[in-house]
Amino acid sequence: MSYAPFDLAGKVVLVTGGNSGIGLGMAEALAAAGADVCIWGTNESKNAAATRELERHGRRVLALRCDVGDEAAIDGALAETVGELGRIDACFANAGIGGIAPSFGEMPTEEWRRVLRVNLDGVFFTLRGAVRHMTARGGGGSLVVTASLAAIEGAARNEHYAASKGAVIAMMRGLAVELARHGIRANAVLPGWIDTPLTERQLGHELAQRKILPRIPMRRWGARGDFGGIAVYLASDASAYHTGDTIVIDGGYAIF
């Protein structure tokens, strides 16, 4: 007999950026555990491919085109998600973009705003809508954000990305305190060096292979499947008393 609290049957989970990388790894595990899943992404072909993968688990799957940096688009997508699937029990604010500048002093204002528009504003818009739905519906819920080790390490020439990820960790801690009375949990997941479409060029570089990989005790890059377990746990009743946490998944990189 399986451990019943991990059973997600009857739950509806939203994963932004769920058409590839970490988000798709989460969505795959959530569907396999019995959840109906909605994914948001801006690339229609990737949405369609992800939908085909997720439907193999026999659950309801909805894929919507949504730019999380667009407040009106978020409101519309949330309404459509609830209209099609009936509710949202867990919301994974995973959509994000990267960026780098020649130096902090030479970082264009437009580059700063481009990254924070998605990585910070997008998380705010997404979670604000999810909170409104969950508190009005009652019955609690789970909020999860994908942050990064960049939030707690020095990220040279990448300060805008690091700032966005540090900010969402602080946001989740505030939400954990504010929303506990409603039975809503809020946690952040901090990936390390993960092989995704966002990082494939960087990790494929000879310098990364020589300088970074040896510093990972597990001696491999992370993969999208490494985030399935934490997604199921945080969406499930098994994490009913777990809130306000920052959960590092990095193969031991941060402690070595």
Image: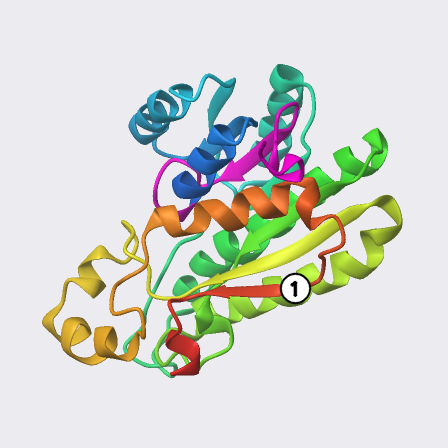
Front-most of 213 and 42?
A: 213
Front-most of 157 and 137?
A: 137
Which residue lies at the image location 51% right of the left edge and 35% below the top edge? 30
Is 103 located above or below residue 101 in the figure?
A: below
Q: Is residue 18 magenta?
A: yes
Instruction: Estimate how packed mark 1 is, as few (under 14), some (14 to 19) or many (20 or more) residues with alpha carbons within 10 Å.
Output: some
Residue 125 visible somewhere in the drawing: no
Q: In which quarter of the image is the N terminus?
A: top right
Q: In which quarter of the image is residue 237?
A: top right
Front-most of 137 and 8?
A: 8
Residue 59: x and y, percent?
50, 19
> Seen in the image, is 244 located left or right of residue 12?
right
Amino acid on which disc 1 is placed: Asp
Is 240 located above or below residue 38 in the figure?
A: below
Mark 1, secondary structure of its residue:
loop
Q: Is residue 71 magenta?
A: no
Q: Residue under label 1, please give it.
A: 245
Q: What stretch is highlighted in magenta?
A: 1-22
> Seen in the image, is 218 located left or right of residue 145?
left
Q: Quadrant of the C terminus?
A: bottom left
Residue 193: x and y, percent?
33, 65
In this rendering, the count of numbered labels is 1
Residue 195 visible somewhere in the drawing: yes
Residue 32: x and y, percent?
47, 30
> Seen in the image, is 172 located left or right of residue 111?
right
Residue 164: x and y, percent?
52, 65
Which residue lies at the image location 65% right of the left edge and 28% below the top edge? 11
Q: Quadrant of residue 228?
A: top left
Colouring chosen for the image of the structure: rainbow
Which residue lies at the image location 27% right of the left edge and 62% below the top edge? 221
> Seen in the image, is 185 located left or right of residue 19?
right
Front-most of 215 and 182?
A: 215
